Amino acid sequence: MYNTKFILTLLCFLLLFSCKKDPKLVFKESSFTTDKNKMVEVIIPVATGDLSIIDNINSVVNNHVIKMLRLDPSEPVSIKTIEEGIDAFNEEYNRFDADFPDTTQDWEAQIDGEVMYQSPELISISLTSYLYTGGAHGNLTISFLNFDTKTGKLIKNSDLFKNMDEFNALANRYFENTIEDKDVLFDPQSFQLPENIGFNDEGAVLLYNAYEIAAYSEGIIEFIIPFESINALLNFNSTQ
């Protein structure tokens, strides 16, 4: 009886110690709206777990969503929450509708997020934004955000790789094999890495949004570099 109690106590202690040493980071899909909202939909992953880690991740994601909802990026940022951003978008439409009461075009904003990749060292999140405020077409934008799993801090693209020059040369080769019609590009002779570099289970995902290197009609351009081709260049272990 004594030995059984001792073993159970020891197992509980070891389990508690293990949980504190290696807290589990979990993402939950969450929807945001307000009482005033009529045209904005926001569904993004929200991190739960160690507060010192999740606060960093959620803060960056929230700020990015707020930025996506802003119609004029040059204006000073006074909005602190996603809910405030949603109300601001609705209020902007109400002002537009009051100034142009005969318009038949309703505005729309959709922001969706997903965890593309999660390993013991890195988390890669994708945020997709579609805003329509009139005109011939809406504006579709995809952003990749990479985080240090242990701290929750955002990782710059330049810190993802050991040698950016080598990665740039490798990416250029994959880009050349991906893009068949080089005439659609603004400058087909001058390769440049995209702003968005993320990861999925296959490898590194490189994505150019509309207008970044080609006309809007070409849409989003993306390609993948498999892990087996870039593992030696990575500043993190790609094993999940």
Image (cartoon, helix red, strand yellow):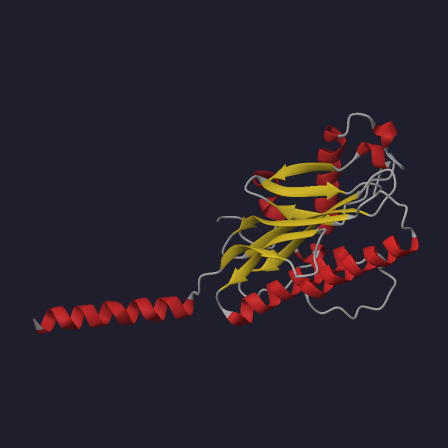
Foreground pick, 183 / 234: 183
- The residue sitting at the left extreme is 1
Image label count: 0
x, y percent for residue 59: 64, 66
- The residue under the point 73% across, 29% down is 177
Q: Is residue 171 left or right of residue 56?
A: right
- The residue under the point 79% across, 48% down is 107
- The residue under the point 48% across, 60% down is 25
Q: Is residue 146 left or right of residue 219?
A: left
x, y percent for residue 117: 56, 48
Residue 33 can be seen in this image: yes
Examine the rendered structure and indicate whether residue 136 appears above or below residue 67. above
x, y percent for residue 212: 83, 43
- The residue sitting at the top extreme is 180
x, y percent for residue 37: 70, 57
Foreground pick, 62 / 126: 62
Q: Determine which quarter of the picture holds residue 223.
A: top right
- The residue sitting at the front extreme is 102
Residue 162 can be seen in this image: no
On-image quarter of the N terminus: bottom left
Foreground pick, 99 / 132: 99
Foreground pick, 92 / 128: 92
